[in-house]
Image (cartoon, rainbow, N blue to C red):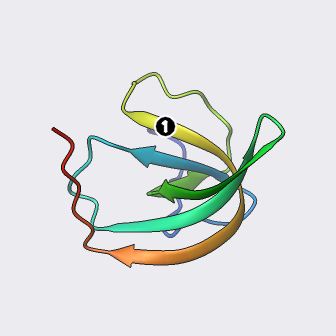
Amino acid sequence: MNNIKKNIPPKKDEYAYFNSKNRGIKTHWIIDTLKNDKIKNGMLCHYSLITNINPKYYFIINNGKITNIETEIKSIKFNYY
């Protein structure tokens, strides 16, 4: 995945990824996606890739193909643990 260009901000019609371990990412996007023929609304996204891959790390989530980018959120803070 290191050789594939990450698009920040994410792009419509590409695949959305969320990295739950990367707390250094300050900006997130709320998006709608299509995955396994199901529409998912209100998903969080850090970046998009043109390639649909299954990440090898449990903390990176492929949320499916972006159908709509709702809004950008800056400086969001999460309490993971």
* Quadrant of the image occupied by residue 70: bottom right
* Quadrant of the image occupied by residue 41: bottom right
Q: How many marks?
A: 1
Kindly state the secondary structure of the residue where label 1 is placed: strand
The residue sitting at 40% across, 24% down in the picture is 57
x, y percent for residue 23: 22, 52
Q: Nearer the viewer, residue 5 or 47?
A: 47
> Is 4 placed left or right of 20 in the picture?
right
Compared with 62, 32 (above or below) is below
Give the position of the C terminus as an image quadrant: top left
> Is 51 placed left or right of 46 in the picture?
right
The residue furthest right is 37
Give the residue type at disc 1. Answer: Ile
The residue sitting at 33% across, 43% down in the picture is 20
x, y percent for residue 3: 50, 40
x, y percent for residue 53: 62, 32
Q: Nearer the viewer, residue 17 or 33?
A: 33
> What residue would you read off at disc 1?
61
Compared with 37, 76 (above or below) is below
The residue sitting at 28% across, 60% down in the picture is 25
Compared with 62, 15 (above or below) is below
Q: Residues within 10 Å of mark 1 (few under 14, many from 20)?
A: some
x, y percent for residue 66: 69, 57
Q: Nearer the viewer, residue 58 or 6?
A: 58
The residue sitting at 56% across, 39% down in the picture is 62
Compared with 44, 75 (above or below) is below
